[in-house]
Image (cartoon, rainbow, N blue to C red):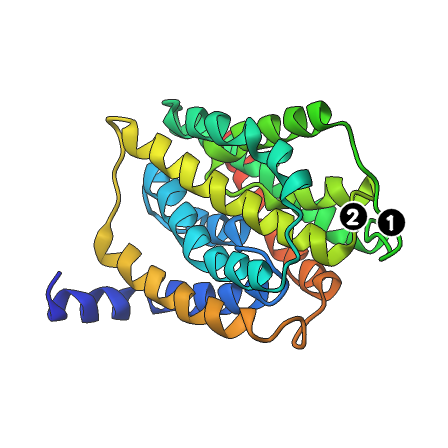
């Protein structure tokens, strides 16, 4: 990729780059990757749906890797409880990413996924557990829930945090900080598995001219956000702010592909 191509791509897609930068800062500040918002932004462009999934997962990986590293240093990851969640999610996320799906089915699935994400974000105030809660769920149930979330996440092109975090809060799985740490690990491993699955599919395609710029953008934004450590926005404020945008995109997608 030459310098001229980089400048041209940056000029043509400056609005996408700016939105990705903002999303990376906001989401990494509360321990998430922002995959659902990346998908929502890309879904409104004319980019191929196969590229949308890969680009969102790559950006997820770049952003959430910094979060996982910081959570690991702070010893917030309870591996004994986290491993059952990711045990089956990894192979199923790979399978979900590998499956060949039509553009029509993808956007319908994406629409419902984003709508679900918007609803959970909007009601998040009611699902935040207190620091005193710490419930050990059955490891088999954890593995089953993680597997289902991983499979759907692989097909859509997200890490699964928008599904996992609300579920863990509702069940009082652990403290909010440890849930955020576990969700970050879950997002990272499932994003990698889903991306490998997509890459293994013969139909895999990606525009590295734009994607490379977006990866650098979210890396910088992610590093900024992860070091804010919740000082900019609380998880509730962030979810409320993005719920409306994601709901709008989801309804627009569903209206187009269902009607």
Q: Position of residue 147 (x, y in %)?
A: 58, 27
Labels 2 and 1: the sequence-earlier one = 1
Q: Who's the residue at 26% across and 44% down the image?
A: 206
Q: Who's the residue at 79% across and 50% down the image?
A: 123
Q: Position of residue 84 (x, y in %)?
A: 63, 32
Q: Is residue 124 above or below residue 229?
A: above
Q: Is residue 168 above or below residue 215?
A: above
Horizontal side of residue 107 vs 145, given as left or right: left
Q: Who's the residue at 41% across and 71% down the image?
A: 220
Q: Position of residue 82 (x, y in %)?
A: 64, 40
Q: Nearer the viewer, residue 127 or 142?
A: 142
Residue 28 is at least partly visible in this image? yes
Say which residue label 2 marks: 174
Assess whether mark 1 and mark 2 are in contact (beta carbons under 8 angstroms): yes
Image quarter (top left, top right, bottom left or bottom right) of the C terminus: top right
Q: Position of residue 168 (x, y in %)?
A: 75, 42
Q: Nearer the viewer, residue 31 or 218?
A: 31
Residue 76: name its quadrant: bottom right
């Amino acid at each position: 990729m030459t310098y001229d191509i980089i400048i041209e791509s940056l000029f043509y897609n400056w609005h996408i780059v700016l939105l990705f930068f903002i999303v990376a800062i906001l989401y990494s500040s509360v321990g998430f990757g922002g995959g659902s918002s990346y998908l929502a932004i890309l879904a409104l462009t004319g980019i191929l749906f196969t590229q949308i999934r890969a680009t969102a997962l790559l950006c997820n990986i770049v952003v959430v890797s910094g979060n996982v590293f910081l959570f690991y240093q702070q010893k917030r990851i309870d591996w004994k409880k986290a491993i059952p969640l990711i045990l089956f999610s990894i192979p199923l996320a790979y399978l979900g990413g590998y499956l060949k799906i039509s553009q029509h089915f993808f956007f319908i699935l994406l629409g419902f996924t984003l709508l679900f994400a918007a609803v959970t974000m909007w009601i998040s105030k009611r699902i935040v557990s207190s620091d005193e809660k710490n419930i050990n769920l059955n490891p088999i149930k954890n593995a089953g829930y993680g597997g289902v979330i991983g499979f759907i996440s692989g097909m859509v092109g997200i890490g699964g945090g928008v599904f996992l975090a609300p579920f863990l809060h509702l069940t009082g799985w652990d403290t909010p900080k440890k849930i955020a740490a576990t969700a970050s690990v879950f997002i990272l491993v499932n994003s990698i598995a889903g991306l490998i699955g997509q890459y293994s599919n013969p139909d895999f395609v990606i525009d590295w001219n734009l994607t490379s710029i977006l990866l650098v953008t979210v890396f910088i934004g992610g590093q900024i956000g992860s070091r804010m450590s919740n000082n900019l926005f609380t998880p509730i404020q962030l979810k409320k702010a993005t719920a409306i945008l994601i709901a709008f995109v989801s309804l627009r997608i569903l209206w187009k592909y269902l009607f």
